[in-house]
Image (cartoon, rainbow, N blue to C red):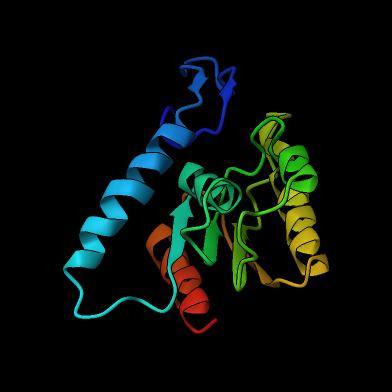
Amino acid sequence: DRDMSPWDSPAVFKSAAPFAGGADDYLRLLAEEIVPAAERRLPSTPIWRGIAGYSLAGLFAVYALYRTDVFSRAASVSGSLWFPGFREYVLSHTPLRQPDCVFFSLGDRESKTRNPVLRTVQENTEALCEFCRGQGIRTVFQLNPGGHHDHPAQRTAAGIQWITNG
């Protein structure tokens, strides 16, 4: 709720803490320290870098495209694209680097909730997918059977596989 949220926002569940908006700090750590340290262990420089995430990390993966030019591919799997103001942010900003490709997926029951904020997840995901396509970015949207917590490892693997073949 701190490292993956792009800005402060009230909690969406009664028992949850509010979002603390620490994504920029975490992204700086990722881009300036973690990625370079990992790449120093590789035998050669990678030809592209991708970022993938599930749930709030899926939101973070898309946000990263707008805050750093380190990644050229992204997968948002069951991404928390319901996050207040995020759709508007994407529609009014330009990625720092034109992505090669972006993968979006959701469970077909994720938007079927009484929570009015979470209910927007499919509409927002589809809108962002169409927006990316309109920008000339190769983009796919997969609607999977189930809810948010169904098969996260398999769904994340599918997103990573898709951007790998990008």
The residue located at (60%, 73%) in the rendering is 100
Q: Is residue 142 above or below residue 66?
A: below
Query: Which of these two is toward me, 115 or 72?
Result: 72
Q: Position of residue 126 (x, y in %)?
A: 76, 57
Name the residue at the left extreme.
Answer: 41
In depth, the one of 107 and 80 nearer the eye is: 80
133 and 158: which one is in front? 133
Q: How many marks?
A: 0
Q: Which residue is drawn at 25% across and 80% down?
A: 44
Question: Quadrant where the C terminus lies?
Answer: bottom right
Left or right: 69 with respect to 83? left
Q: Quarter-wise, where is residue 14 in the image?
A: top right
Which of 135 and 128 lies nearest the eye of the viewer? 135
Task: Give the left or right position of residue 161, taking residue 141 as reference.
Answer: left
Residue drawn at 72 percent across, 46 percent down = 90
Instruction: Tell me where residue 151 appears, x and y as whole percent.
Output: 43, 61
- Residue lying at the far bottom in this picture: please name it: 165
Q: Is residue 26 placed above or below 8 in the rendered structure? A: below
Quadrant for the N terminus in the image:
top left
**Occupied quadrant, residue 10:** top right
Q: Where is residue 4 in the image (x, y as percent from the top left)?
A: 46, 37
* Image-based side of 22 in relation to 43, left or right: right
Question: Residue at coordinates 40% horizontally, 41% vertically from top-left?
Answer: 28
In the image: residue 152, left or right of residue 42: right
Residue 130 appears at what percent x and percent y? Answer: 80, 63
Residue at the right extreme?
Answer: 134
